[in-house]
Amino acid sequence: MTAQQKQTLAKLAGRLDLVVELFGRLAAWISIALVLLVAGNVLVRYFLHTGAIWLQELEWHLIAPIALFGMSYALLNGEPLRVDGLYQRFPARLRLAIDIVSGLAMAVIAALLVKLSIPFVLQSYNMGEGSPNPDGIPHRFLLKGLIPLGFAVLCLQALAETLKAVLRLTPSR
């Protein structure tokens, strides 16, 4: 691999990382909003003896983007799930090979989940699905639309991690 090819791949991986970083920051801000919402709901419920169903549903709805975008952000920041006790004992080249194979597998699985979840979202949209509760949040398909988006972001980050592992595996000329 030439130095120019490595530089191009490194730029691509960096841009993918930036996209995931933005979604990670969004998840962090949503986490803050969730904490404030839960605290507000508790205070209103216990001190004013009232509450709104849609605010309680909103708590659950905010968890989805935190999880869906947070998984990619965790991967970006080196928090993958693996058996580190074994992994750390492997030679460096084997670890890189494992990173490449697992990154590609994760990208394929994430892309498959995007493909499989789109009909689920479209069905929800076509039904005009909303909350079954009176005064609940309408347009539940918007929340379900985060599923393919979250896995698309995970696919991007898996590809970025794979590219970075390939770059570390191949020597520069």
Image: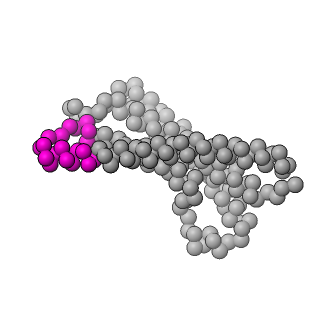
Which residue is at the front of the view, 57 or 35?
A: 35
Q: Is residue 132 visible?
A: no
Q: Is residue 51 magenta?
A: yes
The quadrant of the picture occupied by the C terminus is bottom right
Would you say 101 lies left or right of 135 here?
right
- Principal secondary structure, stretch drawn in magenta: helix
Identify whether 145 is placed above or below 49: above
Would you say 7 lies left or right of 138 here?
right
Identify whether 98 is placed above or below 124: below
Which residue is at the front of the view, 5 or 104?
A: 5
**Magenta stretch in the rendered image:** 38-56
Q: Residue at x 13, y 43 (%)?
A: 48
Q: Residue at x 69, y 53 (%)?
A: 164
Instruction: Report how many numbered discs are placed on residues in the image.
Output: 0
Q: Residue at x 42, y 44 (%)?
A: 29
Residue 21 position in % (x across, y down): 55, 46
Q: Residue at x 39, y 47 (%)?
A: 31
Residue 19 position in % (x across, y down): 58, 41
Q: Is residue 94 visible?
A: yes
Residue 71 position in % (x across, y down): 50, 51
Q: Is residue 73 magenta?
A: no
Instruction: Kindly give the residue lying farthest to the right in the view shown.
Output: 173
Residue 125 position in % (x across, y down): 40, 27
Give the colour scheme of this rendering. one colour
Would you say 57 lies left or right of 76 here?
left
